[in-house]
Image (tube, grey):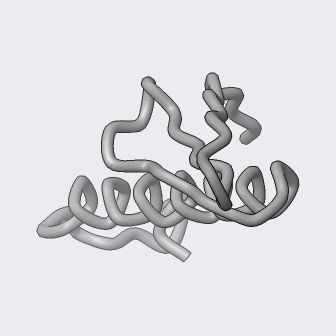
């Protein structure tokens, strides 16, 4: 499943800072905007993965569960 999120980038003195309003806590930084984008993508991925694990905690596992693997 693909998801699209808004990314806002700001240039500081030395680094770019990026965040996504749809994913609170997701922030990235880098010396280039591309480094910042990759950092933000990884932060979003980790936060969403953690949210999924929290959601599934305590749910009985099923062999047919497509999200459990």
Pick whichever, 67 or 43, lies toward us: 43
User: Could you tell me which residue is drawn at 63 percent across and 64 percent down?
Assistant: 42
**Quarter of the image where one finds residue 28:** bottom right
Q: Position of residue 2 (x, y in %)?
A: 75, 37
> Does residue 43 appear to the left or right of 61 in the view shown?
right
Q: Position of residue 35 (x, y in %)?
A: 80, 63
User: Could you tell me which residue is drawn at 58 percent across and 48 percent down?
Assistant: 17
User: Could you tell me which residue is drawn at 33 percent across and 48 percent down?
Assistant: 25
Pick whichever, 33 or 4, lies toward us: 33
Q: Work out whether 42 lies above or below 51.
A: below
**Quarter of the image where one finds residue 36:** bottom right
Q: Position of residue 12 (x, y in %)?
A: 60, 46
Q: Residue furthest left?
A: 58
Q: Position of residue 55 (x, y in %)?
A: 24, 54
> Does residue 2 appear to the left or right of 52 in the view shown?
right
How many discs mark residues in the rendered view?
Answer: 0
User: Could you tell me which residue is drawn at 40 percent across and 69 percent down?
Assistant: 62
**Quarter of the image where one finds residue 22:** top left
- Quarter of the figure that contains the N terminus: top right
Pick whichever, 69 or 65, lies toward us: 69
Pick whichever, 17 or 43, lies toward us: 17
> Does residue 61 appear to the left or right of 2 in the view shown?
left
């Amino acid at each position: 499943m693909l998801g699209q999120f808004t990314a806002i980038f700001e240039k500081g003195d030395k680094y770019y800072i990026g965040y996504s309003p749809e994913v609170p806590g997701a922030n990235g930084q880098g010396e280039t905007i591309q480094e910042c984008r990759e950092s933000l993508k990884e932060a979003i991925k980790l936060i969403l993965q953690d949210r999924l694990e929290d959601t599934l905690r305590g749910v009985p596992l099923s062999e047919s569960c497509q999200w459990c693997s």
